């Protein structure tokens, strides 16, 4: 990874990519059921795998997408094939992926620059595409409505944060960085508002849903901030894709845990 402050101009593309990803993973299942859900998740996984190396500057230009796509296919199969899939089974994919990533580093042409950084970046990609497979479990965990709420909370936070940063990146989270504290706060509160508006229970239940939405929105916003640091100077098409897909991946296990607890 090459850390550094991303340009302020990248906020609008990041918000647009997050909106498209949210529309995809919410709209396709509503239109085509489980098949649409699988297609939507697969599209986001493929986009993350293809954009990862150009966005982060990894030297593994060819190996990272191949390993990422293989991990995505393996994770999806582990979720879809068993009659009673378990989240823990997904750990097998990055476990085997570690061996494949080490072999990939050994096969790189000499001189091998930034071996540790390249290996770490590939492993993070594998964890990201595996986490996206968790989205396939949301309907069975708590129903379609709860899963949709979790996805809308995540997407709203990822859209609201960059939009606020585009207008008001102050006070900044760090000196010279075009990301402000107000964006993080607004993103988390937007997630809470979506959860509250979609919950039809009493005041206590709405309060619980708001707290869950606040947590999920904060996770998405903070991961979105971290993703922005990972893609400075990236190609114009790749950076927004990673800034949208990686936070969705990080939020997916949290969303599943909240849905299992009937938080939404």
Image (cartoon, rainbow, N blue to C red):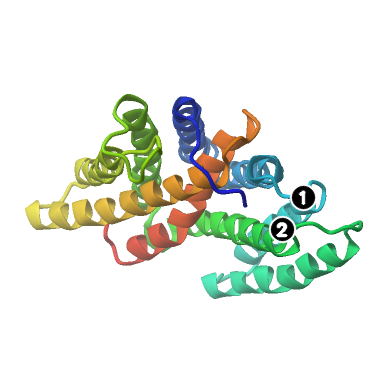
Q: Which residue is drawn at the image coordinates 79% and 68% (left, top)?
A: 100
Dot 2: few (<14), some (14–19), or many (≥20) neighbours within 10 Å? many
Judged left or right of residue 182, residue 67 is: right
Tag 1 or tag 2, which sits nearer the N-term?
Answer: 1
Foreground: 156 or 110?
A: 110
Judged left or right of residue 172, residue 246 is: right
Q: Position of residue 203 (x, y in %)?
A: 8, 52
Distance from Cα at disc 2 to Cα at disc 1: 7 Å
Instruction: Tell me, for residue 59, which label it has, or none.
Output: 1
Instruction: Tell me, for residue 118, which label it has, or none.
Output: 2
Q: Position of residue 40 (x, y in %)?
A: 58, 41
Q: What secondary structure is found at the residue carrying circle 1?
A: loop
Quadrant housing residue 11: top left
Q: Residue furthest front?
A: 175
Number of labelled discs?
2
Instruction: Tell me, for residue 168, which label it has, or none.
Output: none
């Amino acid at each position: 990874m090459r850390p550094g402050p991303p340009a302020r101009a990248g906020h609008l593309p990041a918000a647009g990519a997050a909106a498209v990803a949210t529309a995809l993973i919410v709209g396709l299942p509503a239109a085509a059921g489980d098949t649409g859900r699988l297609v939507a998740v697969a599209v986001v996984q493929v986009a993350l795998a293809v954009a990862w190396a150009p966005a982060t500057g990894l030297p593994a230009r060819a190996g990272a997408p191949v390993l990422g796509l293989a991990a995505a296919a393996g994770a999806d199969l582990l979720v879809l094939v068993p009659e009673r899939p378990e989240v823990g089974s997904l750990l097998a994919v990055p476990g085997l992926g570690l061996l494949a990533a080490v072999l990939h580093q050994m096969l790189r042409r000499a001189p091998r620059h930034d071996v540790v950084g390249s290996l770490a970046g590939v492993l993070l990609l594998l964890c990201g595409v595996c986490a996206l497979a968790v989205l396939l479990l949301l309907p069975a965990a708590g129903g379609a409505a709860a899963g949709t709420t979790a996805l809308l909370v995540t997407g709203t936070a990822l859209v609201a944060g960059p939009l606020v940063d585009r207008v008001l990146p102050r006070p900044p989270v760090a000196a010279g960085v075009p990301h402000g504290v107000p964006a993080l706060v607004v993103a988390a509160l937007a997630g809470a508002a979506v959860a509250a508006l979609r919950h039809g229970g009493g005041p206590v239940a709405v309060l619980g849903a708001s707290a869950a939405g606040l947590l999920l929105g904060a996770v998405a916003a903070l991961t979105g901030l971290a993703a922005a640091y990972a893609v400075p100077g990236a190609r114009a098409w790749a950076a927004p894709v990673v800034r949208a897909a990686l936070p969705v991946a990080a939020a997916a296990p949290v969303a599943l845990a909240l849905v299992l607890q009937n938080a939404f």
